[in-house]
Image (cartoon, rainbow, N blue to C red):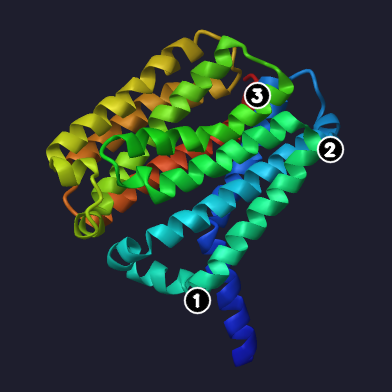
Amino acid sequence: MLTPQLQRSLLKLLSLFSLIRGYNIIVLVLAQYLTARYILAPHRSWWSLILDYDFFSIIIASALTTSAGYIINNFYDAAKDQINRPKKYVLEHLVSQQHQMVLYLMLNMIAFVFASVISSRAVLFFVFYMFAIWLYSYRIKRLFWLSNFFSALLMILPFWAITLYLKNFDILIFYHAGFLFFLILGRDLIKDLENFRGDWVQRYRTLPVVYNDTVTKWIISFSLLFSLIPTYFLVQHPLGLMYYYFVFSIPYLILVLLLLWRAKDQKMYLWLHNLIKIWILVGVLSIALIYQNL
């Protein structure tokens, strides 16, 4: 039997994991390592990357800065989340807002230390990244249309950090980034449909609030279909078994769109949001298959 004190401690840990979106951070770190090993620097071994302290510092700084970003975003969205996700709100606020802000500052400070070990350019990059996340959470997230583009770009920025470090600017990298950008943009717009009630009450100028569900669904449809443009160029390159991931992306995203146009409530939008998250995770894992053939 767990003692009441141990139960409280475990709940606090769960609250913290939810607050920093621990699942997303794990996927981010995994995606960065896989991208570096199989796409950006295929000539390097796993041991070479793992023992590269500067590269490790970039990964840690990215994870810490992104974690801090989720905290500050949660801080400014508290009133909205209380309406849209009351159970999640209660869980995450087992950690007080005062402690959340202390943790936010600590994570950014530690990320700054790791960046300073690499170079002055790394410091500038991560200071810009920290400021961009704060600006998005404080102001841009409430702005019409710009918020969705900004959110998608922020999600891709950590990959730009490792691209700059490994100095690989092959066109194939930009095709992968374009595919991911349009998936994230579509997912972010679906979240706006899911969060309509809280956004409307708190006067966030999201697409569903400014226009309506139908207009938003059309834009989501275009975003997901646009992801097929970089897909077309990607499959022209040797991708090993990852080729099939992009081939199956076509029917998978069409299925998501069919479900999107049938969706009418928050629960269904949550399912669609998670379907895209699952497909992004499958894509991350399939990176390891680039040099595998049948």
Q: Residue 250 appears at what percent x and percent y?
A: 36, 24
Judge left or right: residue 293 versus residue 94. right
Q: Residue at x 65, y 21 (%)?
A: 39
**Which sits earlier in the primary sequence, circle 1 or circle 3?**
1
Residue 186 in view in this figure: no
Q: Position of residue 155 (x, y in %)?
A: 50, 38
In the picture, the quarter occupied by the C terminus is: top right
Q: Which mark is residue 53?
A: 2
Please, what secondary structure does the residue beneath circle 1 have? loop
- Nearer-the-camera pick, 61 or 120: 120
At x 58%, y 59%, the residue is 104
Q: Evaluate whether residue 127 shows in this view.
A: yes
Residue 251 on image: x %, y %: 34, 27
Residue 34 picture quarter? top right
What amino acid type is highlighted by mark number 3? Thr
Q: Which residue is depicted at the point 20% across and 36% down?
A: 217
Q: Which residue is tagged 3?
A: 163
- The amino acid beneath tag 2 is Tyr
CA–CA distance in space, label 1 to label 3: 38 Å
The residue to which callout 1 is attached is 94
Identify whether 197 is placed above or below 143: below
Which residue lies at the image location 25% right of the left edge and 39% below the top edge? 144
Q: Report which quarter residue 37 is drawn in.
A: top right
Report the amino acid beneath label 1: Leu
Which badge, 2 or 1, is on the more N-terminal residue? 2
Label whose residue precedes the other's in the sequence (2 or 3): 2
The spot of residue 280 in percent (x, y) is 48, 37
